[in-house]
């Protein structure tokens, strides 16, 4: 019901003819306005709140684990650098694209990636910016990450000449060559920032575009 209250504040939802519930409180409106006007700053805070909630729920079952701990081999842990906000970035990007690859139309979430246009390691300020993201299927994401494909100023698929040697491969041809020059499906919000796409074309795309 709380989510339905928030849905009544979303212009994307209300613009489609749906209404949500009409019980949104002043706090609901305050939260909605905060995320709508400054989503980039709010995403890490939301991710932190989500982790705290998950940790709290896990504590209720810890005693069950203690009962069987003596019969299990100890796990080995390694320190890892956690990418805070990554899940919310993925959720924001996939939702904006209605859980469909903007190139192929693949609509299975397990095969989709919230792909960074400017890589996570190179642009800390835009790591969680949904306009720095594209919803891509796994193979398209890999080609984009390798610089084998990019997108033009009018959001059309551009192939690198390096793909030419694979043109006779039926799967490569079906995935890439049949879509060369076609426009991507743009999201309902968080349209890819042209500055990021220009950077990808100039600094990440390999070789010359295939004509």
Image (tube, rainbow, N blue to C red):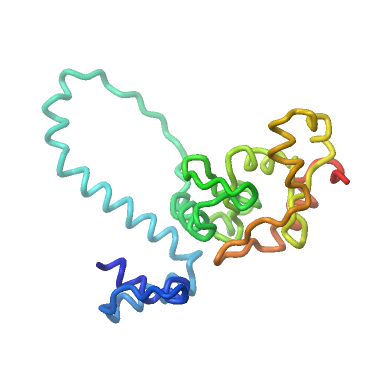
Left or right of 128 on screen, residue 34: left
Left or right of 89 on screen, residue 161: right
Residue 43's quadrant in the figure?
bottom left
Residue at the extreme bottom? 26
Foreground residue among 129 and 97: 97
Residue 193 percent across, percent down from the top left? 66, 63
On the question of residue 23 being in view, the answer is yes
Q: Is residue 210 above or below residue 50?
A: above
Residue 197 percent across, percent down from the top left? 71, 57
On the question of residue 122 being in view, the answer is no
What number of labels is visible?
Answer: 0
Query: Could you tell me which quadrant the N terminus lies in?
Result: bottom left
Left or right of 31 on screen, residue 188: right
| Residue occupying image coordinates x 31% and y 24% | 75
| Residue occupying image coordinates x 77% and y 45% | 205
| Residue occupying image coordinates x 64% and y 61% | 192
Foreground residue among 29 and 74: 29
Residue 42 percent across, percent down from the top left? 44, 65
Residue 5's quadrant in the figure?
bottom left
Foreground residue among 158 and 114: 158
Residue 127 percent across, percent down from the top left? 56, 54
| Residue occupying image coordinates x 43% and y 71% | 13
């Amino acid at each position: 019901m709380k989510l339905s209250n928030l849905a009544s504040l979303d212009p994307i939802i209300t613009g489609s003819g749906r209404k949500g519930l009409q019980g949104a409180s002043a706090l609901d409106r305050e939260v909605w306005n905060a995320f709508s006007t400054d989503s980039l700053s709010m995403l890490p805070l939301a991710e932190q709140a989500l982790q705290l909630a998950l940790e709290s729920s896990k504590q209720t079952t810890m005693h069950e684990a203690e009962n069987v701990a003596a019969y299990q081999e100890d796990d080995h842990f390694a320190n890892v650098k956690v990418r805070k906000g990554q899940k919310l970035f993925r959720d924001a990007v996939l939702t904006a694209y209605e859980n469909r690859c903007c190139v192929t139309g693949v609509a299975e979430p397990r095969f989709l990636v919230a792909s960074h246009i400017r890589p996570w390691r190179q642009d800390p300020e835009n790591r969680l910016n949904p306009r720095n993201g594209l919803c891509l299927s796994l193979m398209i994401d890999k080609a984009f990450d390798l610089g084998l494909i990019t997108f033009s100023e009018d959001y059309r698929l551009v192939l690198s000449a390096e793909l030419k040697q694979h043109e006779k491969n039926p799967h490569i041809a079906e995935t890439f060559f049949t879509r060369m020059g076609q426009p991507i499906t743009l999201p309902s919000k968080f349209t890819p920032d042209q500055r990021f796409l220009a950077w990808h074309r100039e600094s990440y795309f390999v070789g010359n575009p295939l004509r």
